Amino acid sequence: MRVVVQRVSRAQVSVDGRTVGKIGRGLLLLVAMHGRETAEDLAWMANRCVGLRVFQDEEGKMNLSLADVAGSLLVVSQFTLYGDCRKGRRPSFVEAGEPQVSERLIERFVELLRAEKAVVETGRFGAMMEIDLCNEGPVTLIIER
């Protein structure tokens, strides 16, 4: 499982010109599954994403979590995070999970995020999505499990 976390002041995802998910301040999570994730992996990642202390406190230090700033999450599936560009000029996606398996895993991941009391919006799995965001910082992290 690979997640790119971007701290945002706002973000939205659209499909065919229609907004399907939108948040204010919070985290945009670009999520890729390799298909071998366990229930433990998903729970660990949900807890990690919700608990990240990446928002600035009154002293300007990254010391506050999503809950501390009343932030939200926007989860967007992004199988291309498993693109391997080490050979040739076209990325290989052999490490990305099968779509049917990955979709179920991402749905479960979203359920676990919500169980952590996070407000969660999502993109649409497998769709051509457009993401509009305003980075806050910018702060971008990669988390793998």
Image: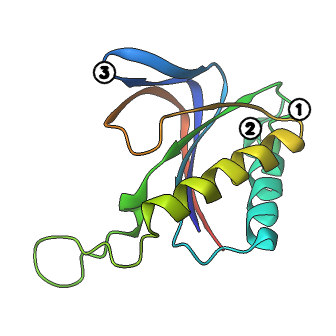
- Which x, y percent locates residue 143? 62, 64
Nearest to viewer (mark 2 / mark 3)? 3
In the picture, residue 9 is in which quadrant? top right
In-image side of 139 versus 109 (left or right): left
- Residue 115 is tagged as none
- Residue 16 is tagged as 3
In the picture, residue 48 is in which quadrant? bottom right
Residue at the image position 45 percent from the left and 16 percent from the top: 19
Residue at the image position 73 percent from the left and 74 percent from the top: 38
Q: Are marks 2 and 1 in contact (CB under 8 Å)?
A: yes
- Mark pair 2, 1: CA separation: 9 Å
- Residue 68 is tagged as 1
Mark 2 or mark 3: whose residue is earlier in sequence: 3
Amino acid type, residue under disc 2 in the picture: Phe
Amino acid type, residue under disc 3 in the picture: Asp
Q: Which residue is mark 2?
A: 55
Is residue 32 visible from the viewing direction of this image? no
> Is 67 or 128 nearer to us in this picture?
128
